[in-house]
Amino acid sequence: MSIKNSNEFIKIFDTTLRDGEQTPGVSLTPNEKLEIAKQLDKLGVDVIEAGFPIVSKGEQEAIKLIVNEKLNSEICGLSRVEKHDIDAAIDCGLSYIHLFIATSDIHLKYKLKLTREEALQKALEAIDYAKAHGLKIEFSAEDATRSDLNFLKDFLKNIANAGVYMIDIPDTVGIMTPKRMYCLIKELKTTIDKPLSVHCHDDFGMAVANSLSAIEAGAIQAHVTINGLGERAGNAALEEFVSALHFLYGKKTRIKLQYIYETSKLVSRLTGVIVQPNKAIVGDNAFSHESGIHTHGVISMPFTYEPIEPELVGRKRYFQPGKHSGTHGILKELEEVGIHPTKEQLNEIVLRVKELGDKGKTVTDADLIAIAESIVGKTIKEKKIVDLVDLAVMTGIRVLPTASVKILLEGKEFVASEVGVGPVDAAIKAIQKLTDSLINVRLKEYRLEAVTGGSDAIAEVLIKVEDKDGNIVSARAAHEDVVMASVEAMIEGINKILIKRMKK
Amino acid sequence: MSIKNSNEFIKIFDTTLRDGEQTPGVSLTPNEKLEIAKQLDKLGVDVIEAGFPIVSKGEQEAIKLIVNEKLNSEICGLSRVEKHDIDAAIDCGLSYIHLFIATSDIHLKYKLKLTREEALQKALEAIDYAKAHGLKIEFSAEDATRSDLNFLKDFLKNIANAGVYMIDIPDTVGIMTPKRMYCLIKELKTTIDKPLSVHCHDDFGMAVANSLSAIEAGAIQAHVTINGLGERAGNAALEEFVSALHFLYGKKTRIKLQYIYETSKLVSRLTGVIVQPNKAIVGDNAFSHESGIHTHGVISMPFTYEPIEPELVGRKRYFQPGKHSGTHGILKELEEVGIHPTKEQLNEIVLRVKELGDKGKTVTDADLIAIAESIVGKTIKEKKIVDLVDLAVMTGIRVLPTASVKILLEGKEFVASEVGVGPVDAAIKAIQKLTDSLINVRLKEYRLEAVTGGSDAIAEVLIKVEDKDGNIVSARAAHEDVVMASVEAMIEGINKILIKRMKK
């Protein structure tokens, strides 16, 4: 269908800090909520739903912090059609409120225990109360998509006439299809003379498609969350909805697309909710290629296997070596690190990479370089000044966490052992015992990134080391064994600081 | 629109083992591919695309293993329109082949360097060759959705007349919308007299919606993958597509829905690709509830906030305590472990839970019980069912990470040792070795919060354990030694799940 008013901006109502925070297991401190709000403002969302004031004291504190920040985005808070909910919102300094009451019979009967008429009466009283306090009102008919259509139309007509600013249609349990959502919005537009918004849940994986369909039918706003967070399977993902609007529907929003990825990373880090690699736009693999056919295509011309330039949404293209790789992609990777194999050597490298893949191994760039080096017969890695030769670590109950370490420094071996509060601490202290006295290098900072998944997930350690001259170097290592990751990062950092010292 | 032929079965063509395995970083051994194929057969998929024979020797071995298993599902292999590709498929014992060549100008020009006519010629020759070898042929016009429509129609008419069994329409870079897909399939059906299939990618999060739209327009099959694996953002997720067909579109498939969740878990475990918690149908949170309003609703009547019964897709409902919790959900959780607070006590417990949430803490079941115990003044913890008596863990360079553990269970001591990828993994596996066989409790999820400061900073571990009945309990522990924190969380979780089980 043709899109009318294509020069208008579709409004982005972000509810990461409200419905998103209701993701089971997610809790944010007031300062974390503020940090996310500032990022959403930078991203350019029209509205930030900052929270549900009645929930807790911390929630109120967070909303006040965000309101006082005076961002460009409008700040909104959720409220039931209850005076004390509205009062809590007013206390937070909000001037924009998102009122809701359910309109489906199942919610009215089992949850609210109200008749349809009573629900309408309560809603109208709350609107009057909010209006009397000068609030801008957005109104949601919860579970609208399972409500009796005639009642819903009648109900919302009354709500519209009561003087709200916007009416939102929540698909509370995510049971809509794009076609049904299109028809519903079209139908509601025939009787309701207010701007319409939608709030879609992703229980069948169609929150984004349903939201887009509502826009096609004439809605002017959608409720979305970063990374599709929210109750159960979550809400429509901002990154997918906005990208589709821009690139597939020819619609505009005020979102600065280039900040999408950093926003996704920040929200994932602060909420602790991981983004799966095969997630559109923001997943690790969204712009990665492994198979030979795809890699070959993308090298010849990126658009063969990419819908958009990764940079438009703050991403970078990545070629993953592996069993499906062809020669084109692998050659390109090797040339980037200064390895130029002959055609025969290249074929041999590709074969070895495939063999590794057939064994079920994920092939890393380091694996690829190691294979290439062994075949081309050239070593491109810098000589290590300090090398870890041996390490033994133990811990347990009634076992003092202890580590022994042997390092090689300029051809000589040095051994030390230490105890610590745990195995990582003991190992770091043992290494430091040597490096501190021999070369004046000490650990300055240690950070272990959160590990999510299983007990065998990869741990990533970032460290900073410092020498007596105040040189500081940071290093990183990843390993399934948190002790090994810590030790490898430490050794890497020590080598870097020694190289740095030598170059001075 | 009305759905015609609603008593027909929509065909499910699963490509987890082909496009899914092309997920960057995923490699499966032949035996792992066989294990997944058997599970897909149990799940009831019509077709298993077992691989791309020309890719590697390991790939061919895997396909042969699967063909020889003589499953109920048909087995298919991918092939370019090249004789040696087809020969490789025949060598694997395949009798069903999935031939493809691109039809978009961008692919023809930059990747294949063929004219439209040359591409058609190659395709027809390959079809003749495959037919001469008695193969059943499914044909894909790669990048169909970006191909010139008139050329595509003409091309596919020729392909259809050449005697293929099915024609597949790939949305190779995921740029379709439900409406455009509907129109395309309708249009193609006017000229092509063969069954149509679709193969959708999820670059804008609409693979499932687009696939469903194709079915509405008359396609009879979709290519899908478990967990939506596949190139870049992946393919349409089987679990979402099939659930939507059954519950929203009134269509049937041969999928046994109750095996969806176990299939998702198996594929995630073998591929190493995690499923995000807020993933529809199979994500951890898809049937979890935290907020007070939702929990209250679901306790009164599950359908208030659930689109379907979780058990239909092999899931269980879970209530997560937290800052958004209300009194109803918390009371229900406490009663399940035998704590019956007064109304005043309950209000105090809820307040304390919210305070913990406001501090940014994920509230575990164990936290909730500890808070309740301190307020109700009753200790249900005293009697630890499982106690950790001894633990010894070692790791290092050329040291296999190993753990020995002794636990006390109902007065008896049990000892086990295990190796792992690191000391934490070894310790968890050693405990699990005992609890899995003795009381059917396994680790479901492990999360180590980020550690910042020094190597002696406190590590905080959150775990979820699950028993064979699907009971899930979360627990937390903090310790300077990451191994001890992990082990203590695990023991705490095991005790809580046993208490829960005893009360039921």
Image: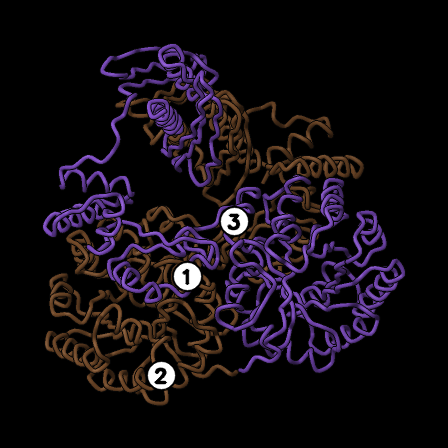
Chain colours: A purple, B brown
Label 1 to label 3: alpha-carbon separation: 16 Å
Can residue B327 be seen from the camera position used here? no
Q: Chain of mark 1?
A: A
Q: Residues within 10 Å of mark 3 (few under 14, many from 20)?
A: some
Mark nearest the camera among 1 and 2 is 1
Name the residue carrying label 3. A262
* Quadrant of residue A502 within the rendered picture: top left
The tag on residue A309 is: 1
Image position of B275 (left or right of B371): left
Q: Are marks 1 and 3 on the same chain?
A: yes
Above or below: residue B81 compared with residue A102: below
Secondary element under disc 2, as helix, strand or loop, is helix
Three-letter amino acid code at disc 1?
A: Glu
Image position of A79 (left or right of B235): right
Q: Residues within 10 Å of mark 2 (few under 14, many from 20)?
A: some
Which of A335/B469 is in front? A335
Name the residue carrying label 2. B149
Label 1 to label 2: alpha-carbon separation: 24 Å
Q: Chain of mark 3?
A: A
Residue at (48% x, 71% y) in the render: A248
Task: Kindly check if marks 1 and 3 are in contact, taking CB atoms under 8 A apart as contact.
Answer: no
Label 2 to label 3: alpha-carbon separation: 38 Å
Above or below: residue B245 compared with residue A319: below
The tag on residue B120 is: none
Secondary element under disc 1, as helix, strand or loop, is loop
Q: Position of residue B139 (x, y in %)?
A: 25, 75
Three-letter amino acid code at disc 3?
A: Glu
Q: Position of residue B386 (x, y in %)?
A: 50, 26
Three-letter amino acid code at disc 2?
A: Leu
Residue at (70% x, 42% y) in the render: B331
* Number of numbered tags placed on the structure image: 3
